[in-house]
C-alpha cells in the first residue's frame, strides 16, 4: 500500500465515523463539533486529490464560517431540555433508514459494476489545476459571469437573513 | 477499478448517512447539518472527477456550491430562529401549520 492510499483510507474511516456521530448524537452541540471533524477529513481528502485551493476553502468557509454560524445559533436558542424532542424509534424511521440503505446498495452496485472510465489519473495535470493561480485565472475569465451572480446571491442571502430573523420590521 | 472509485463509494456512503439523518431525525438543526453532510459528499464527487479528468470545471462547481451553501446556511438558520421564536420548539413534527 502506498502512502496516498493509506492517507485515503484513514481519512475515509474518520469521515464516515464522524458523519455517523453527527446524525446519531442527541445534543446538537456535539453534532456540530463532529461535523467540524468531518469537514477537516474532507479537506484532507481534497488534498489527496491534489485540489489545494478547495481544501483551504473547505476549512476557511465550512469549518470556519458556516460552523461558527451553526454553533452560534445553537447557543442562541439555548436548547437545554432535549427530552421535549420526541426522538424515539418508530416503525416509520426504521423503514426510512432501510430505504436509505437500499439506495446505498444500489449506488455501490452501480459504481462497482459500471464500465471502467478512461485510464489512470494524470497527476501533473491534476496538481496544476488545483492551484490557486490556475483556479483564479479561470474564475476571472471563463467563469466571470457565474462569479458575479454569486455576489447577488450572497447579497440576497444577507438581506433575507436579516428580514427573517428580525423581531419586528418597523 | 479506476483511481477515483474508492472516492465515489466514500461519497455515496456519506451522502446516504446525510439522507438517513434528514429522514430519521426530528431536530431541525440536526436535519440542517445532515443537509450540509450531503452537500459535502457531492463536492467530494465533483473534486474526484475533476482530478481524474484533468478539468477544472468540477472544482469551479465546488466553489459555487460552497457559496450557495453559505447563503443557504444563513437563510436556513434565520428561518430556524424565527420558527423557534414563534413555537418555542425545534421538533419538526410540531411545525406543521402548512399541513392540510
Image (spheres, rainbow, N blue to C red):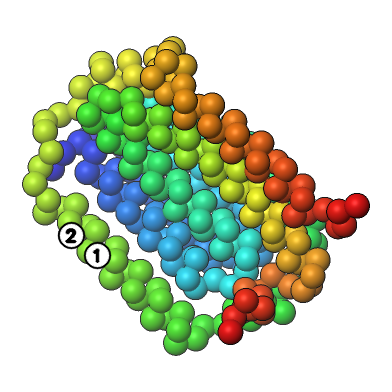
Q: Nearer the viewer, residue A159 or A90?
A: A159
> How many residues crowd around disc 2 within 10 Å: few (fewer than 14), some, or many (20 or more)?
few
Instruction: Give me the residue at 77% from left, 47% from top.
Output: A162
Which image quarter is the N terminus of chain A in? top left
Above or below, comparing residue A147 to residue B15 in the picture: above
The residue carrying mark 2 is A109
* Residue topped by disc 1: A105
The residue shown at (33%, 42%) is B45
**Drawn side of residue B91 relative to residue A124, left or right:** right
**For the residue labelled by badge 1, is the local secondary structure a helix, a strand or a loop?**
helix
Q: Please tell me how crowded label 1 is: few (under 14), some (14-19), or many (20+) other residues with Cα within 10 Å.
A: some
C-alpha separation, residue under disc 2 versus residue under disc 1: 6 Å
Farthest bottom residue in view: A91
Residue found at x 45% / y 84%: A92
Inspect this view and state whether residue A21 appears: no
- Residue B77 x/y as whole percent: 68, 54
Residues marked 2 and 1 touching at CB (< 8 Å): yes
Query: Which corner quadrant of the image does residue A165 belong to?
Result: bottom right
Please tell me which residue is depicted at 45% across the width and 59% down the height of the picture. Answer: B18
Q: Is residue A123 above or below residue A90?
A: above
Question: Between A11 and A117, which is closer to the camera in this rendering?
Answer: A117
Query: In the displayed image of the protein, which residue is found farthest to the left?
Result: A115
Comparing A27 with B28, the one in front is B28
Amino acid at each position: 500500500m502506498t502512502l496516498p492510499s493509506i492517507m485515503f483510507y484513514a481519512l475515509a474511516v474518520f469521515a464516515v465515523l464522524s458523519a455517523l456521530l453527527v446524525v446519531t448524537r442527541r445534543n446538537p452541540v456535539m453534532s456540530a463539533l463532529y461535523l467540524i471533524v468531518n469537514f477537516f477529513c474532507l479537506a484532507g481528502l481534497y488534498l489527496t486529490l491534489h485540489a489545494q485551493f478547495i481544501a483551504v476553502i473547505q476549512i476557511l468557509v465550512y469549518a470556519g464560517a458556516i460552523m461558527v454560524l451553526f454553533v452560534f445559533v445553537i447557543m442562541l436558542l439555548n436548547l437545554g431540555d432535549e427530552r421535549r424532542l420526541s426522538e424515539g424509534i418508530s416503525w416509520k424511521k426504521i423503514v426510512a433508514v432501510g430505504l436509505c440503505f437500499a439506495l446505498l446498495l444500489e449506488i455501490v452496485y452501480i459504481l462497482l459494476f459500471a464500465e471502467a472510465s478512461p485510464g489512470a489519473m494524470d497527476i501533473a495535470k491534476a496538481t496544476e489545476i488545483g492551484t490557486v493561480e490556475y483556479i483564479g485565472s479561470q474564475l476571472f475569465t471563463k467563469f466571470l459571469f457565474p462569479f458575479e451572480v454569486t455576489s447577488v446571491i450572497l447579497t440576497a442571502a444577507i438581506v433575507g437573513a436579516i428580514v427573517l430573523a428580525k423581531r419586528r420590521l418597523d | 477499478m479506476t483511481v477515483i472509485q474508492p472516492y465515489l463509494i466514500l461519497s455515496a456512503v456519506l451522502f446516504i448517512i446525510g439522507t438517513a439523518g434528514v429522514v430519521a431525525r426530528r431536530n431541525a438543526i440536526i436535519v440542517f447539518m445532515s443537509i450540509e453532510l450531503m452537500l459535502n459528499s457531492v463536492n467530494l464527487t465533483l473534486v474526484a472527477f475533476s482530478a481524474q479528468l484533468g478539468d477544472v470545471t468540477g472544482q469551479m462547481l465546488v466553489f459555487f456550491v460552497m457559496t450557495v451553501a453559505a447563503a443557504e446556511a444563513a437563510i436556513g438558520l434565520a428561518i430556524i430562529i424565527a420558527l423557534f421564536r414563534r413555537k418555542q420548539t425545534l421538533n419538526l413534527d410540531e411545525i406543521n401549520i402548512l399541513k392540510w
